[in-house]
Image (cartoon, grey):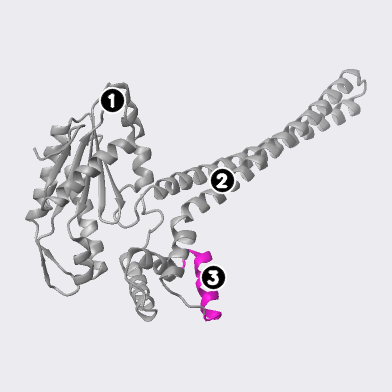
C-alpha cells in the first residue's frame, strides 16, 4: 500500500536515513517513529510544504522541540494523504469541467457546420451551371473536412482527459489506502481497521455469522525502548506485524491499534477458534530470540498478552472492543504472557 508513497531505492532510503538520524541527533530529539517520519519526509524532499516550514523555522532560529515536530507530523505527514486527496479531487473536477466545456463547444460547432452543409445541399439542388455545381461541391468537401478535423481534435482531447482522469483515480485510490495504513508496520491503522470490519459487524448483528476479536499488547515494551532504543523497538513492532500476518488467513483482519497494541478481527470464527489463534501467536513469539541490530546485544525473550471476545447479539464494535480489552487487562494483571477470554459475562482463562 505504501510503495506508491515511498518508492525510494535501498541506496536513496539509506541516504535519507543517515540525514534524518543526524538531524534528530543534532536537535537532541527523541528517536520515535513520529520524529523519524517527519525528518525522512524532509530529507527526501518529497514534502515541499514541510521542507519550506522547517527551512523557515531554522531561518527564524525558532526552537525545534518535540512539540513542534509533533505539530509538523500532524499537519504535513499524518494528514498529508487527506490534503493531497483534496487537491487531486479539485484537479479531477477541473478536468471534468474542461471536458464538458469541450464537448459543449464541439456540439455547438457541429450544429453550425450541419446547418452550413444543409445550406450547401440546398444551393446544390438549385444550381444550374457547371461552375456553380463545382464551387458548391468544393465548399461541401471543405466543410466536411473541417468536421472531420474538429472531431479528430475532440477525440484526441477527450482521450487525453480520460487518461489523466484514470491516473488521478489510481492516485486517489492509493492515497485512500495509505490514509488507512500504519506507516511503520504496513498494517491497517485504527481508521482502516474500523472500515474493514464494518461488513463483518453487520453480518454478526444479523446473526448470520460469528465474529471474534483479539486485542494483543506487547509485555513491558517500554523496557525495550529504554534499554535498546526506539529503532530496536520499531523493529520489534515490524516483526510482530509480520508474525500476525503469517498467522491470520482468509477474511481475517489485522491492524495496529496504537503504540504496542494490535487488534485482529476473525469473521466466521467462534471464541474457541480465536483463543486457539491467540495462543499460536503468543507461543510463536515466546519462542523467538531477539538481538539488537545496532549493538548486537541479546534482548532475550519478548512476550505478549492477549484478550479475546466473541460478538454478542445487540452489541456494537465499541462494546466488543471493550470486552476484549478487559480480557487483555486481566491477562496483564495475572502475570502477562497469557491469553484471557471474555465470555459475555466475565473474563476467564480457558
Residue 149 visible in the picture: no
Cα distance between the residues tagged 2 and 1: 40 Å
Task: Assess disc 2: are there few (<14), some (14-19) or many (≥20) residues with their C-alpha within 10 Å of its C-alpha.
Answer: some
Residue 210 visible in the picture: yes
Helix, strand, or loop for circle 2? Answer: helix
Q: Nearer the viewer, residue 91 or 268?
A: 268
Kindly identify the residue that appears in the image at 44 percent across and 46 percent down. 176
Foreground tag (2 vs 3): 3
Task: Assess disc 1: are there few (<14), some (14-19) or many (≥20) residues with their C-alpha within 10 Å of its C-alpha.
Answer: few
Task: Assess disc 3: are there few (<14), some (14-19) or many (≥20) residues with their C-alpha within 10 Å of its C-alpha.
Answer: few
Helix, strand, or loop for circle 3? Answer: helix
Which mark, by number, is residue 89?
Answer: 2
Q: Is residue 142 above or below residue 188?
A: above
Kindly identify the residue that appears in the image at 78 percent across and 33 percent down. 143
Cα distance between the residues tagged 1 and 3: 53 Å
Q: For the stretch drawn in magenta, what is the main secondary structure?
A: helix
Which mark, by number, is residue 52?
Answer: 3
Pick whichever of labels 2 and 1 is earlier in the sequence.
Answer: 2
- Quadrant assignment, res 3: bottom left
Residues drawn in magenta? 45-61
Helix, strand, or loop for circle 1? Answer: loop
Q: Nearer the viewer, residue 203 or 15?
A: 203
Q: Nearer the viewer, residue 26 or 323?
A: 323
Cα distance between the residues tagged 2 and 3: 24 Å
- Quadrant assignment, res 97: top right
Locate residue 234, reporting x and y percent: 26, 62
How many numbered dots are placed on residues in this image?
3
Label 1 sits on residue: 313
Pick whichever of labels 2 and 3 is earlier in the sequence.
Answer: 3
Kindly identify the residue that appears in the image at 20 percent across and 73 percent down. 294
Locate residue 19, reporting x and y percent: 37, 75
Amino acid at each position: 500500500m505504501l510503495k506508491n508513497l515511498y518508492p525510494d531505492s535501498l541506496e536513496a532510503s539509506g541516504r535519507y536515513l543517515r540525514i534524518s538520524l543526524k538531524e534528530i541527533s543534532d536537535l537532541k530529539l527523541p528517536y520515535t517513529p513520529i520524529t523519524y517520519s517527519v525528518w525522512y519526509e524532509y530529507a527526501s524532499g518529497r514534502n515541499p510544504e514541510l521542507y519550506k516550514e522547517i527551512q523557515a523555522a531554522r531561518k527564524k532560529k525558532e526552537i525545534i522541540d518535540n512539540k513542534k515536530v509533533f505539530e509538523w507530523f500532524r499537519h504535513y505527514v499524518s494528514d498529508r494523504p487527506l490534503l493531497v486527496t483534496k487537491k487531486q479531487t479539485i484537479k479531477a473536477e477541473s478536468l471534468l469541467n474542461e471536458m464538458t466545456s469541450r464537448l459543449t463547444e464541439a456540439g455547438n460547432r457541429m450544429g453550425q457546420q450541419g446547418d452550413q452543409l444543409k445550406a450547401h445541399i440546398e444551393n446544390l439542388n438549385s444550381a444550374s451551371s457547371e461552375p456553380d455545381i463545382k464551387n458548391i461541391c468544393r465548399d461541401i468537401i471543405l466543410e466536411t473536412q473541417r468536421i472531420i478535423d474538429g472531431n479528430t481534435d475532440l477525440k484526441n482531447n477527450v482521450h487525453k482527459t480520460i487518461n489523466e482522469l484514470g491516473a488521478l483515480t489510481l492516485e486517489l485510490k492509493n492515497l485512500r489506502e495509505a490514509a488507512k495504513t500504519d506507516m511503520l508496520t504496513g498494517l491497517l491503522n485504527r481508521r482502516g481497521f474500523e472500515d474493514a470490519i464494518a461488513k463483518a459487524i453487520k453480518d454478526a448483528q444479523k446473526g448470520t455469522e460469528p465474529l471474534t476479536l483479539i486485542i494483543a499488547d506487547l509485555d513491558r515494551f517500554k523496557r525495550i525502548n529504554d534499554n535498546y532504543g526506539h529503532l530496536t523497538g520499531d523493529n520489534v513492532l515490524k516483526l510482530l506485524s509480520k508474525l500476525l500476518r503469517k498467522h491470520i488467513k482468509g477474511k481475517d483482519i489485522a491492524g495496529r491499534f496504537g503504540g504496542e497494541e494490535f487488534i485482529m478481527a476473525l469473521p466466521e470464527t467462534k471464541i474457541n477458534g480465536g483463543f486457539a489463534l491467540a495462543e499460536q501467536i503468543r507461543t510463536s513469539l515466546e519462542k523467538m530470540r531477539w538481538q539488537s541490530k545496532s549493538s548486537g546485544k541479546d534482548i532475550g525473550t519478548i512476550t505478549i498478552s492477549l484478550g479475546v471476545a466473541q460478538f454478542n447479539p445487540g452489541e456494537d464494535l465499541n462494546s466488543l472492543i471493550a470486552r476484549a480489552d478487559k480480557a487483555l487487562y486481566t491477562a496483564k494483571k495475572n502475570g502477562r504472557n497469557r491469553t484471557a477470554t471474555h465470555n459475555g459475562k466475565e473474563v476467564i482463562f480457558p
